[in-house]
Image: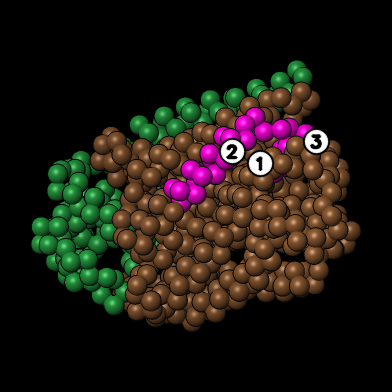
Chain colours: A green, B brown
Amino acid sequence: MKPALMKRVVALSLFATFMAYSMYVYTAGTHLPQAVAFHAKVSAGQRLFQENNCIACHQFYGLGGYMGPDLTNVISATGKGPLYAGVFIKNGTVRMPNFHFTDEEADAVIAFLTYVDAAGKYPAENPRIRWYGTVEDAK
Amino acid sequence: MSDAADNDNVGLWFILLGLCALAGGLVFGTIGASQFLYPGFLQEVPFFKSRPLHVSLVVSWIFLAAVGGIYYYLPRHCGLKLFSDKLARLHFWLFMVTGLAILGCYFSGRFGGREYWEFPAVLSIPIFLSWILFGINYFRTVARKRDTWPVYLWMWGTGAIFFLLTFSEAYLWLFPYFRENIVRELTVQWKAYGALVGSWNMLAYGTAIFVMSRISGDDRPARSNLAFALYFLGLTNLMFGWSHHNYPIPNAPLIRNIGYIVSMSELLLLGRIIWNWRRSLSTYQKYRHQQAYRFLFASEWWIFLNLILALIISVPAVNLITHGTHITVAHSMGSTIGINTMILLASVFCVIEDRVGIRLPAKYSVPVRVGYWLGNGSLLVFWVALIGAGLGRGTYSGGSFQEMMALIRPYLLVFLVSGVGLATGLLLILAPSIRLIYALGFRDRRLVAAVAPPMETTG
C-alpha cells in the first residue's frame, strides 16, 4: 500500500472508531445509575445555575472552578442538606456574591442540587484500588 | 512585494488580535488569582466574571495566534495562495465582532454558564460559522498541493475539523436527551472539552513542527514516518484520552478504562523526549540566538514536565487524590502557557524574524529576553505552588471548605506572587511583539525600517 493511502486508511479507521465510540458514550455508556427524576423545578434550577455562572466557582464531580466547594453531594452530606445549602444560596458569603434569589428561585436551585446528588457519590466512598492502578466501586 | 506578502496581512491581523487577547487574559487572570486570596478585591469584576474573561481571552489567544500563523505561512512559505482572501477577512471580522459581544456579555453578567464557553449559547453560532469559513479556506487551499503533505498540514486540518466537531458536541446539552441526564451531560461535556484541547494542541504542535522546519531549513523531519506515527498517537489521544477527566463520574467502567489505557500511551512520547535529550541540547546551542527557537526550546521543557504530571494524574488511583484540585489547574496552566503559549510565541517571533531579521534592536530584544526568563521562572514556581495546593486539598480529610482553604493559603500566596511575575514576564514579551506585528500588519514602514533594513520577501 502506498504511504499516502496508508495514512488515509489509518486516519479514516480511527475516525470511524471515534464516531462509534461517541455513539456508545451518548447512549449505553451514560445511563443514570438509578431513577432520578428531572422535572420542571429541576430544569428551572439548572437554568439559574448556568445563568449565574455558578460553575465558575463550584464543581460537580470535581469539574468546575475552585473558589467554592464541590456541590455534587451537598444535599446528602452529613451536617449539610437543603436548609444548609439554602442559606448560602439566599445570602451569599464573603467568597460568594448574593444573587438576590427569590424563595422560589432558591428552591429551584436546591431541587437541581438534589437531582445531581441522587445520581452518584463524589468522592468515591469505598474505592478499591487494583495493583495496576484502576479503581473499582468508584461510583 | 509579492502577492504572498500582500495576502498574508490577514494572518498578521489574527496574530495581533491574539497578542492583545493574551494581554487582556493575563490582566484578568491576575485579578482572578488575587480574588482567590482576597475575595473582596475589585468587586466591579467579581470572580465569576474575571474567571470567564481570563479563560475566554487566553483560549482566544491560542486559536487566533495558531490560525493567524496558518494564514500567514500558507501563502508565504508553503507556496499556497489562499483560496479566498475575502473569506479570511470575513473570518477575522466575524471573530472580532463575536469576541467583543462575548466580552460585553461577561461584563454585563450575561452567561451561558458552561465551563470554557461561559457566554450565552447564541454566540456559539457566529463562532461556528467563522470556523466553517476557516475550514473551507484551509482545505480548498491545501487541496492544490500536489506532492505529499508534511505532517503539519495534516495537524492543522485535524485541528480545524475537530474544533468544529467538539465545539458542536459541547452544545449537545441544549437537547433535553443530554440535559436531563446529569451523567450523560457531564460525560459528554468533558468529552467535548478534552477533545477540544486536543484540537488546539493539533494546531499548536503543527505550528511548532512548521517553525522548526523553517528555522532549520529542513522539511524532511515533518515528512518522516516517525512524525506521522506521533501524529496518529496524538490523534488517538485526542479521540479517546479525554475520559481521564471523567474517572469519578458514574458512567460505564469501559469509558474510564479506555481513558486510562490511551493516556498511558503518552509514555511513548516521554520516552522519545528523553531519548532525544542530547540532540535537543545541541540544537539549542546551534539556534539559541533566534528568539523563535528559544521559545520552542522552552516549550520542550514544559512538554517534558507536563507530560510527567499528566501521566501521574491519569492513573485512576492517583486521580482519586488529585482530581478536582489545583493539580488539574497546574496541568492546564502548564499546557496552555508552558506549551501552547511558548510554541505560539515562537511562531510570532518566526513571523517577526522572517520579516525584519533575527537581530532585533536592543529596545525590542532586551524586554523579550528578560520576559522569557522571568515568565518561565515564574511559571515553574506557579506550577509547583499549584501542585502543592492541590496535594493539600486532595489529602484534606475534614469536611470544612474554609478550613481546607486556610490550610493551603501559603501555597496560594506563592501562586499569586509567581502569577504576577508570570504576567509581568509575558507582558514584557507582548509589548514589543504587538508593536512589531502592528507595524508589519498595518504597513508602518517607518517602524519596520527602524528595526531592520528594507523588508525582503523570503520564499
Under circle 2, the secondary element is helix
Badge 1 sits on which subunit?
Answer: B
Looking at the rendered structure, which numbered label has been put on residue B277? none
Q: From the image, tell me which residue sits under label 3.
A: B224
Spatial CA distance of label 3 from label 1 is: 24 Å
Please state which of the two labelled residues, at mark 1 or mark 2, is closer to the viewer: 2
Q: Is residue B19 left or right of residue A93?
A: right
Please rate how many residues cluster around mark 2, counting C-alpha atoms within 10 Å: few if below 14, some from 14 to 19, many from 20: many
The three-letter amino acid code for the residue at tag 3 is Ser
Label 1 and label 2: CA atoms lie apart by 8 Å
Which residue is the extreme one toward the front? B446
Spatial distance from mark 3 to mark 2, Cα to Cα? 31 Å
Q: Which x, y percent locates residue B245?
A: 46, 50
| Magenta region | B70-99
Q: Circle 3 sits in a helix, a strand or a loop, which is it?
A: loop
Q: Residues within 10 Å of mark 3 (few under 14, many from 20)?
A: few
Kind of residue at disc 1: Tyr
Circles 1 and 2, Cβ within 8 Å, touching? The answer is: yes
Q: Quadrant of the C terminus of chain B?
A: top right
Same-chain status of marks 3 and 1: yes
Disc 1, SS = helix
